[in-house]
Image (cartoon, rainbow, N blue to C red):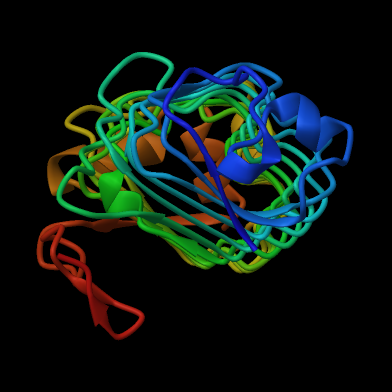
Amino acid sequence: MGLKLGSTSIPLIKTTYGTGEWTTEAFIQGLAPSGSITINTSSISAYAFMNNKVITSVAAPNCISLGTYAFYNNSMLTHVSMSQASVIGNNAFQSCTNLLTVTISGNFSTANAIGASCFYDCSSLTEVNFTGSGAVGINSIAGGAFGNCINLSSIDFTKFNSLKAQALFRNTGITSVYAPNATNVGYWESVFMGCLNLSYVRAPKSTQVLGRNTFNGDVALQLVDIKNSTITGGSVFYNCSALKTLILRNTSVMTIAGGGSANFTGVSSCNVYVPSALKASYESATNWVDLVNSGQLIFNDLEGSPYESVDYVYAGVPEN
């Protein structure tokens, strides 16, 4: 049965059942039938449907702002569609363990557009689509937004202008990252930590720093292409045993804080491609030289390599 929530701001003033409009109180008390709902309000308040056990799908075509914890722990919710969203609050869909698909179109250029832990622990989530003519670049996304979404294997990273958030995709099923528009890709502390299926990351315009545990434990990671200025913290590439290609597009030697070996423990015979004018400097630079001497990293000229252009083909797919 499809239910429609009316034109006023949620929670609604309780109406008779014959209108087909239901208050949030009715859902909480179990008075409203289960099924899909359409919400025609421009905003959904914080905690509006928290811990709901009957809603199976949500369409919110006019919703611009979704409050914190709005659908937190909705155990039956499987599908969400929003076509004008600009703000999704913290923990909005956290622990919706049966949520499968999310389709969102809107303007995410504002600050705090996608809140902290908004999809955290959505363990069944397989598909997130930022789509439609209204979808523009995501400029702000908070920490843990997709953390522990263990079945989320792909997402359109071309929509992301920013990936600057702690544990953003930690322990997800993401297999690859191609973020050609992301320039604010810094302080990635634990952002892809524990992504056991992640094979490559390409963010060639990124300009910030890599934080502690960025790729820690990503045992399938084979290629990383970045333009970051600093590796900070430790264990950035810890136990990335499959890493064989690292592309550093910096115009100066990238610095490493926390020691070279501490950031590359478990990495061996990895080819590093850098601008030819910087190759000798890398090979003698603090912390880098130890990795060269140990045979963990082998520096190569970026010019003339298959990776010189950012438009190269990788894994059989032209990425631009």
- Pick whichever, 243 or 64, lies toward us: 64
Instruction: Name the image quarter holding residue 83.
Output: top left
Please say whether residue 24 is visible from this viewpoint. Answer: yes
- Pick whichever, 100 or 308, lies toward us: 100
Residue projecting furthest to the bottom:
316
For residue 255, side relative to residue 167 (left or right)? left
Residue 143 drawn above or below residue 131: above
Please say whether residue 286 is visible from this viewpoint. Answer: no
Instruction: Pinpoint residue 19: horizontal percent, then vertical percent.
Output: 57, 41
Residue that appears at 28% across and 46% down: 159
Residue 124 drawn above or below residue 13: below
Residue 313 drawn above or below residue 275: below
Instruction: Name the image quarter holding residue 266.
Output: bottom right
For residue 82, side relative to residue 265 (left or right)? left
Instruction: Pinpoint residue 267: horizontal percent, then vertical percent.
Output: 64, 57
Residue that appears at 41% across and 29% down: 285
- Pick whichever, 235 or 37, lies toward us: 37
